[in-house]
Image (tube, rainbow, N blue to C red):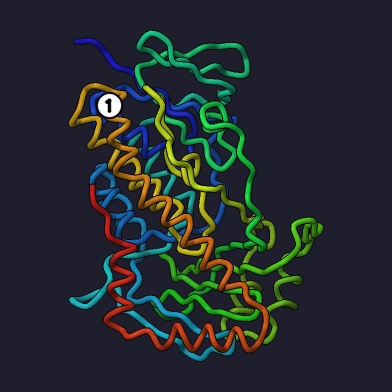
Amino acid sequence: MTVRRAIVVGGGPGGLAAALAVRRAGFTPLVCEAAMELREVGSGLTLWPNALRALDDLGVGDAIRAAAAPLAAIAMNRACGERIFAVPCEGRDGIGWAAALHRAELQSRLLEAVGGSAIRLASRCVAVREHHGTVTAYLDGGEELTGDLLVGADGLHSRVRAALAGDDELRWAGYRVWRGVAELDVGDRTGVTSLGRGAQFGIFPMSHGRTYWFASLSGARDEPAVRRPRDYLGSQLASWHAPVAQLVDATDELSIVCTDVFDRRPLRRWSWGRITLLGDAAHPSAPTLGQGACQAFEDAAVLSRCLMQDHDVPRALQRYQQRRLRRANAITDESRRLGNVGQWRHPAACRIRDWFIRAIPEPMRRRQLRGMFRYEQ
């Protein structure tokens, strides 16, 4: 039997999920990661019901469940602590399994499933080419890797995307996000996002008594980097409800990650012959909906199914694109829109925003959430 090889560019969660996807479709994956090592970097992230269903299809759902403490509910507050709404995750009326997980824990489970032998470190892809039924990845050291399929999962600054779709401009979202994991048990299994003036703060309980938090603050793109994030966030969020200040103070300052938020205009196409894109390389979004990794996992599961259903690679990649393009691009658009609304500063506008969110009937709110978390192959 002829061995078919798939080259995956990028060794983050999306790239590792892509490796699982192509393996399930009968390809031997080779993951090219630019970094010298897959370090345990980053902080937390949220996984929603659509992500878990996709991970189940990739064969790693149980491993992820074992590493996480699921949320009982999600809620939204005002900065003063007043509750705007709450929706259960569990039970008959719940929206489904959801949890916060450390990025390193997620990546280690995916890496264990892929296997270290499939990973090539210090392998930065600088160009790609399709020629006579094969694809070639050109590495910065001059080496050329050839395969039957190539998946660009190399993130926001994707070289694969730039090679195929052109180097389109990043779009500044108007805010930065600080993320951390505090060694503090908030004593509640509810994931809460609180809205303020030009700011948001998220609190998501994790396993082992830890809490993942994020703070998004409006600002100018050229503002200098903050050297002491705990002091800065403490001053910016001093009037917010408990335990906002306590969570920031309980976090190792060196572990706090700050990210300038960008996205890109949605593409109308992300598959070319035997080359396709996945995750942030295809549809980078603002983090407002917490769907970045979730959408990458959906991509991977759908890609796997399309490759299993059709052995003609270019045709399978077109089918993958067709099934994913509208939903993924809609998430990008909605994330940007809600990010803008969440960063409103004017007191009257913020009161109207909070009132409008509260006024949504609960059945409609649950339908909206279930629609966002609905994953279909």
Q: Which residue lies at the image location 64% right of the left edge and 43% below the top edge? A: 169
Closer to the camera in the image, 10 or 188: 10
Amino acid beneath label 1: Arg
Is 217 located above or below residue 129 in the figure?
A: below
Q: Which residue lies at the image location 67% right of the left edge and 83% below the top edge? A: 346
Whole-percent x and y of residue 293? 43, 51
The image quadrant of residue 321 is top left
Q: Could one spot residue 117 in this view of the protein?
A: no
Q: Which residue lies at the image location 24% right of the left edge and 34% below the top edge? A: 306
Left or right: 305 as drawn, with respect to 111: left
Whole-percent x and y of residue 6? 36, 23
Q: Could one spot residue 252 in this view of the protein?
A: yes
Secondary structure under tag 1 reads: helix
Q: Which residue lies at the image location 56% right of the left edge and 24% below the top edge? A: 125
Closer to the camera in the image, 252 or 221: 221
Is 37 located above or below residue 181 in the figure?
A: above
Q: Which residue is mark 1?
A: 315
Closer to the camera in the image, 128 or 50: 128
Is 289 located above or below residue 5 in the figure?
A: below
The image quadrant of residue 371 is bottom left
Whole-percent x and y of residue 212? 51, 66
The image quadrant of residue 21 is top left
